[in-house]
Every structure is written in C-alpha cells, then in structure tokens.
Image: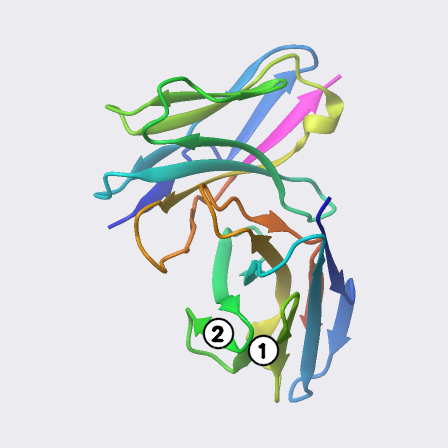
C-alpha cells in the first residue's frame, strides 16, 4: 500500500530564515505530487504540483519554490520566510489516472515569528 | 468560474444519528469529479468518497454516502450512525476530468461537524 511522509511535523522559524519541507511517497511510482497551504480556519490553497522529476507547476506567485529531485520526493523551499508564510503545509499524491484522487500526508505546521 | 460552496460553517449531530453536510458546485466542464475529505484536529486530510459526474449511482463507502443531484449541482455528504470520531472539518472539492494537465482541485471552505454523546 502507498504511504506518504512529511517532515518536520512542526517548525518555528524566524522571519528571513530559509525553509525546507520534505515529502516522500512510498509504494507507487511516477506519482503526481502537490504542495498545499492551509491558513487557520481556511480551505486549501494549491501552491505547486509536479507530474514528473524536474517538472514543477506554480499556482501562486510567492517567495516559495518547489523541487522534485527524485520520482517520489517533493521539496518545498524558501530562501527568506515571511510572516505570511505561516500556516499548515500539506503534501499530496495522486496516481494520474481516472479520478486522480489525491491522498495527503500528515502535514507540517509552520510558524514564522 | 468554478466554485464550491459549503453553506454550513458548523453542524451538530447526536451520536448514532445521521447528518447531511451540504455542498453545491458551479462548473461549465461537462465531466468532473466530486470529492469529500475529512480533516480531524490532527490536521491530516483524509479522503472519504468520490463521485464522477457521469456515474449513474450515488457513491457509497461504508457509513458515507454522497447524495448527488446533478441538475441542482449539489453533492451532499451523508454520514449515517454518527460516531464521536466523526467530529472534524469536512471539505468538499471538485476537479474537471477532461482538462489535460489541469489537476487543480477546487475546494470549499469546509463544515465543522461536532458529534455529541
């Protein structure tokens, strides 16, 4: 069966510091991968998605970036965090077929101070 | 424009009773999929149920069923025999199915469900 991992689970970072959040998927190959952000009490905002290694589509212009160095690894980064980057970050995968149901990881809570 | 509307910010239900969470959608795509997710306080987004726009029957998954009314553009989630563990946020989402590389899910703002003992 497929599993998706995210780390760290929580993170407190000062404004202006760099960020690296990692997501890995097991039990599947060539998944579509997604990064979402959820602000407190809000719905999900798609940040990036990837249909293959090195292929990244950005949905929202911001100071975040994403990379996919390996088939089942998706990394969310920032060179300098802003206060507005605080939120709950969720990684998801889909198999690129049929309904393309997205399955989510446990998420990372980021607080920028 | 594509949009998901969940009009109930909060709902209460007594344990063991059934509850319906509303979801209406707006799309011009002829083929689309509708999804429901559960988000407990831990934060993980859990997939519950899927309905395709051309599916002839309403989807069911255990205690979850989807009351799909295409003409009304509604896709309400019905939870039967509520349990305390059903207390969570519930999100409705939609995606066009024949949109090439457009894999973007359109999300509602969610409904908070509290199950009372």
Q: What's the residue at 58%, 61% (across, down)? A: A30
Q: Which residue is mark 1?
A: A67
Considering only vertical position in the picture, is B64 above or below A82?
Answer: above
Quadrant for the C terminus of chain A in the image = bottom right
Camera-side residue of A80 and B71: B71
Tag shown at residue A56: 2
Is residue A62 at least partly visible in the picture?
A: yes
In space, the residues marked 1 and 2 are separated at their CA atoms by 7 Å
* Count of numbered tags: 2
Q: Is residue B72 left or right of residue A107?
A: left
Camera-side residue of B53 and B37: B53
Quick one: label 1 or label 2, which is nearer the N terminus?
A: 2
Say which quarter of the image contains residue B6.
top left
Is residue A113 at least partly visible in the picture?
A: no
Q: Position of residue A29 (x, y in %)?
A: 63, 58
Q: Is residue A75 left or right of residue A96?
A: right
Q: What's the residue at 45%, 42% (across, down)? A: A98
Quadrant for the N terminus of chain A in the image = top right
In the rendered image, residue B113 lying in the magenta stretch gets the answer yes
Element at label 1: strand
> What range of the chain is rendered magenta?
B111-117
Q: What's the residue at 69%, 40% (across, down)? A: B40
- Disc 1, disc 2: CB below 8 Å? yes
Chain under label 1? A
Q: Position of residue A5 (x, y in %)?
A: 74, 58
């Amino acid at each position: 069966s497929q599993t998706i991992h995210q780390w760290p689970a929580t993170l407190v970072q000062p404004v202006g510091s760099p960020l690296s959040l990692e997501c890995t998927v097991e039990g599947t190959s060539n998944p579509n991968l997604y990064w979402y952000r959820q602000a407190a009490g809000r719905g999900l905002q798609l940040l990036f998605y990837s249909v293959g290694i090195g292929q990244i589509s950005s949905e929202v212009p911001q100071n975040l970036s994403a990379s996919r160095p390996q088939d089942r690894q998706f990394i969310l980064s920032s060179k300098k965090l802003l206060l507005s980057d605080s939120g709950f970050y969720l990684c998801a995968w889909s198999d690129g077929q049929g309904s393309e149901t997205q399955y989510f990881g446990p998420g990372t809570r980021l607080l920028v101070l | 424009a594509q949009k998901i509307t969940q009009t109930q910010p909060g709902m209460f239900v007594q344990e063991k009773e059934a509850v319906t969470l509303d979801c209406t959608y707006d799309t011009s795509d002829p083929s689309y999929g509708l999804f429901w997710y559960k988000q407990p306080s831990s934060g993980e987004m859990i997939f519950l149920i899927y309905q395709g726009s051309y599916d002839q029957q309403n989807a069911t998954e255990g205690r979850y069923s989807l009351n799909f009314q295409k003409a009304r553009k509604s896709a309400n989630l019905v939870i039967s025999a509520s349990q305390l563990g059903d207390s969570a946020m519930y999100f409705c989402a939609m995606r066009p199915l024949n949109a090439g590389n457009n894999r973007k899910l359109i999300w509602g703002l969610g409904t908070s469900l509290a199950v009372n003992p």
